[in-house]
Image: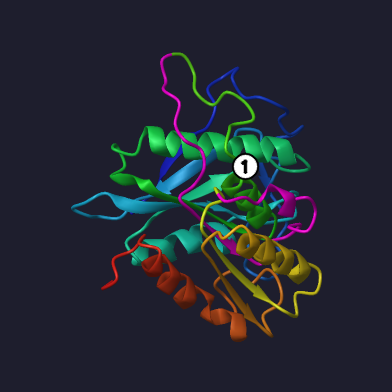
Amino acid sequence: MPGVVVTLWSKGTMPGQAASGPERAMPARGDNVLRLTDISEPSFTVYKVAADKPTPAVIICPGGGYGILAYDKEGTEVAAWLNSLGITGIVLKYRVPKNQEGAFQDLQRAIWLVRHRATEWNIARDRIGVMGFSAGGHLAARLSTQAEPSVQLWLNNEEPQPIRPNFAILVYPAYLDQGMVGLVNTKTAPTFIAHADDDKNFIKGSKVYHEALVAAKVPNTFFRVATGGHGHGLRSDKEIKAWPEQCQAWLKQIGMLPATR
């Protein structure tokens, strides 16, 4: 089913800065990954599933060091997997490069819009999660700890909506040891973390973030294995390849998926 593309900000309303050039795909590296950069008009694409009842939804934040978006490997491929579970996948195209605050504003606006238009897309407002890979995991963690929007996300006659997700999924998240731990509190969204120990640059952040979740008594699961490295998405043949099955089981455990699915 083709996705529904939604522009985040109407003309003249986007806070912060845009990229200096037009959106473009980076040159191919022979690894079959679509890398996008220079995102000036952030948007998301909704991949719906056919269902009689409102479905859970997950906003997916591809990674790329806040410089590019690994748009298929950590975006559209993940949406297809979520669809197979009966979950609406929403791939976020947030502002890059070098625009962490713009990216965060885009994610906040995205979850606001998804809740605002949930009925239109047959989404359950109380089962909307956020998911991120690498830098996208950092972005998702920020939102799961953020109680109030950093900018006004609604316009004219639009109504405010809660922006904290109902759950968060962090796959080899980056930068979590750089100020994120202090944001964790009892209201932080239930969290699933998947990470391999041989991702030497970023496993420390997942460890300390997990410890902070435990200390705050936030429901969480840390799927930690020895091998898998970084940047694999759904394509790994190492131990980390089991993360999707583990994540599905966790979603059932916290009541976001039926136990029988």
Q: Position of residue 246 (x, y in %)?
A: 48, 76
Q: Position of residue 41 (x, y in %)?
A: 60, 33
Start-end of magenta stretch: 157-186
Q: Position of residue 8 (x, y in %)?
A: 52, 32
Q: Name the residue at 35% across, 67% down.
A: 84
181 magenta-colored: yes
Q: Name the residue at 71% across, 71% down.
A: 230
Three-letter code for the amino acid on which mark 1 is drawn: Tyr
> Can you say which quadrant of the picture contains the N terminus?
bottom left
Q: Which residue is mark 1?
A: 94
Q: How many other residues sit within 10 Å of disc 1, few (<14), some (14-19) or many (≥20)?
A: many
Q: Position of residue 140 (x, y in %)?
A: 60, 51
Pick the front one: 224 or 43? 224
Q: How many marks?
A: 1
Q: Is residue 32 left or right of residue 57?
A: right
- Rendered view: 157 above or below 141: above
